[in-house]
Every structure is written in C-alpha cells, then in structure tokens.
Image: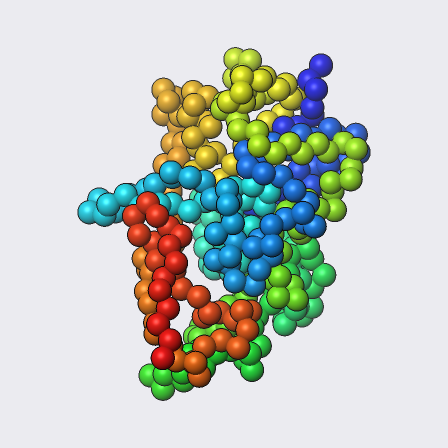
Amino acid sequence: MPEYDVIVVGAGSAGAVLAARLSEDPARNVLLLEAGPDHGTADAPAGLHAANFFQAAFEPDRLWPNLVATRARVRIEEFYARGRGAGGSSSVNAMGAIRGIPDDYERWANELGCTGWGWAEMLAAFLRLEDDLDYGGDGLHGRGGPLPLSRTPTAEMSPLDHALRAAIVDLGYPVGDDYHAPDATGLSRMALNRRAGRRVSTNDAYLESARARSNLEVRGDVLVDRVLFDKRRAVGVRTTAGDDIVGAEVVISAGAIHSPAILLRSGVGVADDLPVGAQLKEHAATPGFEIALNEAGRMPSPAGSSSRRCSATRRTWPTRVPTTCR
C-alpha cells in the first residue's frame, strides 16, 4: 500500500494551493515536498511580508542559486530569478495580480481544445479566489476569496508617480484604473497581492490554514530528483538524498523551470518526443534602470510602487542600484 494518496512536489504558487485543496478531504493523505525552507506565516522571514518586493528577493536562500538563462540568441547568460521555499515565487515576486485576456481563454477552449478553460469558467474561478479590496463584489471582481488584490491609494503615490501619470495623460493616453474591467485600456494602478501593506503568498493564503490537518504533511529542504515509475504509472519520487517515497499519485508543481527538469531526469520527454519544457515564454522586462530623485520626489512610505529600483546584471541579480538623491 502506498504511504500517501498524493505526493505534491513543490510548495510554491501551484503546489501550496494543490496541497491545501487536496487535503480538504480528510480521507486523503497528502505529502507536500519543498526543496527550500518551510515555515508557517508567523515564522516567515520579515522580508517575505514587506510591502517592497525587493526585500523578499534579498532574503537568504529564497532564490534558486546559479540558475541562469539566455533570453535571446544574442544575449549573454543572466541570472534567472525563481522563488525557493514555502510559497515559491509567490513569496518573492512583484505581487502583480493580472488576469489573462478573456479572448485568449476563449481561444484556448474553442480553438485548442482546452475544455474548462473558457472565459466563463475562468471568471468563476477568479471570483472564488480573489478578494479585491477596491472593486470586489460586483460579479466581475471577487470578494472574500483567499488572495487579496489591493492598489496603492492615489494620495499615497509618490510625486514621481503623479508626474509620470500626468505626462502619459498629456500624451493622449486614457486612464483605466481597473484593468480587469471589460474592454479596459489605458493607464492603471497596479493590483497587488497585499493586505494591509503586507504580501500574501500562496503559503499564507492557502497552506497556512491547512497545516493543522492530520492528513497533510509538509517537508521542507527536500529536493526531488525524479519520479519513480512502474511501467507508465507514477508510483512515487526519489529525493537527491536517495530516499524513495511511495504514493498512489504524484503531482509535479515545481515551477516552470524545475518541473520539466524533474520530468526529464525521470526519462519523460527524453526519447518519447513529448515537448517537455518546450515553448517557455517569459514576459517582457527591462534589465533595470536608475532614476535620480531629490527628497521631494521620494516615496513617503515603502508601500508605494516606485520606491526602489533593481538591475539584473549577468549572474549577480538581485543587485542594489545606487540611488542618487539631491
């Protein structure tokens, strides 16, 4: 008999949610394995709850070390930031809460055969998971869900924010404060997964309330090497320490980089023509820039959107950018 009904690999943005939801059934024994440190909300390092996400990125051991990527053929290798530890990248990312475009979901369902991924189904899912503190409860924005969405009040924005907004409007671009509104376009405040100025990761929103369940076991600092198979059926995992853990089902939710790596080490996608890890696309981003601000232009508090900058330089990201104040 398997020791666990389900083994979930990775306690990040997906794995923490899966383990919490699967363990809602008291008859299902769930094991959650996390390669990085595990902790509850109260024991999390202070930087993981900071309003400014760079403080989380600078917490020791919260980013995978020595992970590099070549983002285009002409580019050099650069550090590729991926979260490590309870909450995964949701504990260290920029907290941006942005849904996909309804037309894309409809295309997935109607053209690509992804049943259940149409806009109607996805909107229902968003309404269940969101707690939109600004627009929630109108049938288009969730209210009371586990993940908060909040926006920096206009009065608390920095003079730099106000100057940039005024310049964009002067150029003729519209203002659309709620980018989740139907047909929204224009300049918006960023919706963030924060409540009362503190980050809320999937570890906080989902896993925290499930940790007391007797049918859920969470192990930190356990790196999974590969999936164990009986012919074509997954029957467990092997850790890098050489331990075999048996489970009736195995869920790989180790992130966009490490999930395909585990599968490839397991032989999946090696000689079977399965496109494991193929077609990964990252969103566009600048490599970093620096703005010199005088005292009048700086943020009055760390809770705003333009209080810190960061440069991604080769393998050394995150690197503190010198700030010149005059």
Q: In which image quadrant can residue 141 be found?
A: bottom right
Count the marks. Answer: 0
Q: In this view of the protein, which residue sits in the foreground, 182 or 233? A: 233
Where residue 29 sits in the image (x, y, percent)?
A: 73, 28
The residue at the point 64 percent across, 32 percent down is 219
Where residue 75 sits in the image (x, y, percent)?
A: 23, 47
Q: Quick one: which residue is furthest to the front in this view?
A: 326
The residue at the point 24 percent across, 45 percent down is 76
Q: In which image quadrant can residue 298 be found?
A: bottom left
Where residue 252 sits in the image (x, y, percent)?
A: 54, 32
129 versus 69 height, above or below: below
Judge whether residue 296 can be spotted in this image.
yes
20 versus 322 height, above or below: above
Q: In this view of the protein, which residue sits in the foreground, 208 or 13? A: 208
Q: Quick one: which residue is furthest to the left in this view?
A: 74
Query: Would residue 225 be found to the left or right of residue 18 on screen?
Result: left
Where residue 319 sits in the image (x, y, percent)?
A: 37, 54
Q: Which colour scheme is used?
A: rainbow
Query: Would residue 165 be found to the left or right of residue 286 on screen?
Result: right
The quadrant the N terminus occupies is top right
280 versus 310 height, above or below: above
100 versus 277 height, above or below: below
Judge whether residue 178 can be spotted in this image.
no
The residue at the point 44 percent across, 83 percent down is 296
The residue at the point 74 percent across, 42 percent down is 210
Q: In which image quadrant can residue 30 be found?
A: top right
The quadrant the C terminus occupies is bottom left
